[in-house]
Amino acid sequence: MADIIKKGSAHWEGTIKEGTGHISTESGALTNQPYGFNTRFEDKVGTNPEEILGAAHSGCFSMALTLGLGNEGFTAESIDTVAAVTLSKDEKGFFVSKVHLESHVKVQGGIDEAKFQEIAAATKAGCPVSRLFNAEITLDAKLI
């Protein structure tokens, strides 16, 4: 399979605190979504890179989990995943230090807890976005 390339873009104007920017995706799913210091550090309306990473990670994990379940003969009825991305600061500056995945999964026909946890853990380790992060990634997977 050939490499797949997807693009996201950002435009920024001004200083770090007073400036503003816009984030867009090639597909148009996000178009000129505002972001800035206040949306990243002060909870103002708009987006920020960490929540976009969280959305990407939760989406990737959910898709990969349905594949993992399917490869073992199970079908997911629903998967709801939240990725909590932690932005930390050290002497070098800000960095993503942790991502905690919380996934609630309903499987058609049932699956035992041990097998489910095995598949979920393998998915956390192998999900393409998990592999991107140089951060501690934890998982709380609940079979519902």
Image (cartoon, helix red, strand yellow):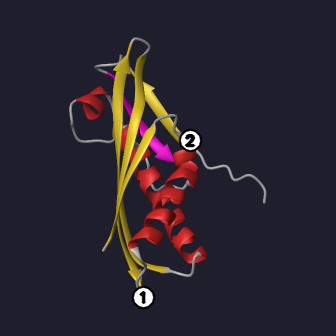
Q: Which residue is mark 1?
A: 109
Q: Amino acid at mark 2?
A: Leu
Magenta-drawn segment: 19-25
Residue 92 x/y as whole percent: 44, 13
- Residue under the point 56% across and 81% down: 73
Residue drawn at x 28%, y 20% as measured from the top left: 18
Left-right relation of 17 to 118? left
Residue 61 rendering spot, x and y as whole percentages: 48, 58
| 110 vs 130: above or below | below
Task: Using the image, determine if residue 12 lies above or below residue 61.
Answer: above
In the displayed orientation, state which residue is furthest to the front: 114
| Dot 1 amino acid type | Gly
Q: Which mark identifies residue 144?
A: none
**Mark 2 highlights which residue?**
132
Q: Work out which quarter of the rendered image holds the C terminus and state it.
A: bottom left
Mark 2 or mark 1: which is in front? 1
Toward the right, the furthest residue is 1
Q: Residues within 10 Å of mark 1 (few under 14, many from 20)?
A: few
